[in-house]
């Protein structure tokens, strides 16, 4: 636990290579991610599997989405701390607390001031905008390399513990979340499928065209930061053995 806290120390992060720039990228990505999820949800064509599950369960229990998602992330975080501390950093906490509340804030504004989108072309445009925003935010978040969101960490832990390839571990967790979301009336739709098949290539585009240029980093010399296998999202920051590198 002391090692985790030391790694999350703002002074430690600031002294690491491109530390301040990475923190700003991470914080902006969390806000953008929450906004992207809200746009996706507003399209009424589904959201990503984890969000779908949390929206369904929070509505069923009558609690705010932001609070419920934070609680779910806190439960997952306990397992991450016990099983794979190396995945935790400042970005883990910012993601688990921030994304749900940002999404809830914008969703409240839409419900209060915007009409429900009626035509299919409008819904499709909103869904595609949501995919673009989520992909950009994921690219910024992963490139900042300041930890992994609790839900994303579950796939890496399953991979590490079971020896099942990561992409199949992620499929398992996504299918479970989608099934729960569907069972409890969550926003499962074409958008849920689109995120699974098209988000990766879009993230790859933003990695090379936006995130890496913002960071202006030579990754071969980026020694102070742990990298993780984000190949599912188009990431390039992976260790030689395809798992983790320090």
Image (cartoon, rainbow, N blue to C red):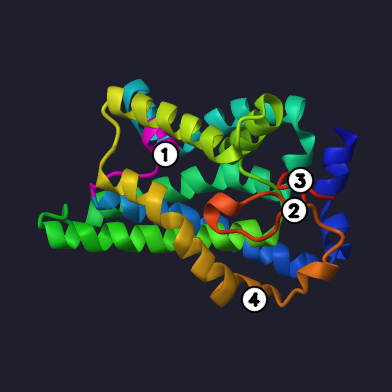
Query: Of callouts 4 and 2, which one flags the residue occurring earlier in the amino acid sequence?
Result: 4
Structural distance between the alpha carbons of marks 4 and 2: 18 Å
- Helix, strand or loop under label 3: loop
Structural distance between the alpha carbons of marks 1 and 4: 28 Å
Q: Position of residue 48 (x, y in %)?
A: 39, 43
Cβ atoms at labels 3 and 2 below 8 Å apart: yes
Q: Residue at x 56, y 61 (%)?
A: 139
Q: Which residue position is annotated with label 1?
A: 51
Q: Which residue position is annotated with label 2?
A: 227
Numbered label attached to residue 244: 3
Q: Residue at x 68, y 61 (%)?
A: 144
The answer to whether residue 219 is left or right of residue 232 is right
Q: How crowded is mark 1: few (under 14 residues within 10 Å), some or many (20 or more)?
A: many
| Residue 62 colored in magenta in the image | no
Query: Of callouts 1 and 2, which one flags the residue occurring earlier in the amino acid sequence?
Result: 1
Cβ atoms at labels 1 and 2 below 8 Å apart: no
Camera-nearest residue between 176 and 77: 176
Q: Which residue position is annotated with label 4?
A: 214
Query: Of callouts 3 and 1, which one flags the residue occurring earlier in the amino acid sequence?
Result: 1
Query: Of callouts 1 and 4, which one flags the residue occurring earlier in the amino acid sequence?
Result: 1
- Helix, strand or loop under label 1: helix
The answer to whether residue 106 is left or right of residue 83 is left
Q: How crowded is mark 3: few (under 14 residues within 10 Å), some or many (20 or more)?
A: some
């Amino acid at each position: 636990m002391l090692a985790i806290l030391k790694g999350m120390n703002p002074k430690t992060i600031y002294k690491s290579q491109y530390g301040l720039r990475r923190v700003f990228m991470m914080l902006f990505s969390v806000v953008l991610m929450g906004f992207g999820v809200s746009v996706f949800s507003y399209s009424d064509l589904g959201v990503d599997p984890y969000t779908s599950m949390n929206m369904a369960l929070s509505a069923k229990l009558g609690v705010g989405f932001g609070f419920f998602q934070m609680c779910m992330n806190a439960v997952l975080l306990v397992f991450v701390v016990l099983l794979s501390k190396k995945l935790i950093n400042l970005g883990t906490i910012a993601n688990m607390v921030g994304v749900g509340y940002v999404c809830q804030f914008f969703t409240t504004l839409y419900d209060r001031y915007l009409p429900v989108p009626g035509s299919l072309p409008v819904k499709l445009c909103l869904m595609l905008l949501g995919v673009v925003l989520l992909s950009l935010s994921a690219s910024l978040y992963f490139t900042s390399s300041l930890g992994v969101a609790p839900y994303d960490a579950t796939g890496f832990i399953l991979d590490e513990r079971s020896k099942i390839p990561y992409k199949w571990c992620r499929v398992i967790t996504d299918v479970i979340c989608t099934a729960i979301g569907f069972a409890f009336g969550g926003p499962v739709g074409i958008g849920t499928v689109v995120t699974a098949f098209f988000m990766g290539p879009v993230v790859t585009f933003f990695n090379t065209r936006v995130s890496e240029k913002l960071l202006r980093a030579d990754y071969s010399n980026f020694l102070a930061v742990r990298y993780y296998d984000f190949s599912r999202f188009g990431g390039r920051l992976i260790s030689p053995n395809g798992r983790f590198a320090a």
